[in-house]
Image (cartoon, rainbow, N blue to C red):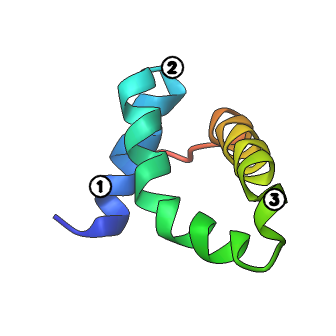
């Protein structure tokens, strides 16, 4: 199964407000989040990480899925 198809399935489940799936999606993007946080000061990283994850969850819920 391709990664994009797997992510699509996870996104579909996340839209049903499955917290386990939401955590799995966040874990998949954790390397990118950490890399982005390196661009800011150490003392602000945890607060910014929390903000990023919160925004990420908001985007997951608002993303429109087009079923084919």
Please determine whether, in this image, residue 55 is positioned above or below residue 36: above
Who's the residue at 73% across and 36% down the image? 58
Who's the residue at 62% across and 41% down the image? 60
Mark 2 surroundings within 10 Å by alpha-carbon count, few (fewer than 14), some (14 through 19), many (20 or more): few
Residue 34: image location, x then y, percent: 59, 68
Who's the residue at 78% across and 80% down the image? 39
Question: Which residue, given by chain and number where applicable, does mark 1 sit on?
Answer: 6
User: Which labelled disc corresponds to residue 17?
Assistant: 2
Question: Which residue, given by chain and number where applicable, does mark 3 sit on?
Answer: 43
In the rendered structure, which disc, 1 or 3, sits on the residue that comes first in sequence? 1
User: Which labelled disc corresponds to residue 35?
Assistant: none
Residue 26: image location, x then y, percent: 49, 48
Q: Is residue 32 visible?
A: yes
Please determine whether, in this image, residue 45 is positioned above or below residue 14: below
- Give the quadrant of the N terminus: bottom left
Q: Cα distance, mark 1 to mark 3? A: 35 Å
In the rendered structure, which disc, 2 or 3, sits on the residue that comes first in sequence? 2
């Amino acid at each position: 199964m391709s990664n994009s198809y797997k992510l699509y399935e996870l996104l579909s489940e996340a839209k049903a407000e499955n917290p386990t799936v939401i955590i799995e999606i966040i874990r998949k993007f954790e390397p990118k989040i950490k890399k982005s946080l390196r661009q800011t000061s150490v003392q602000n990283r945890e607060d910014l990480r929390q903000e990023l994850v919160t925004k990420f969850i908001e985007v997951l819920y608002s993303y429109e899925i087009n079923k084919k």
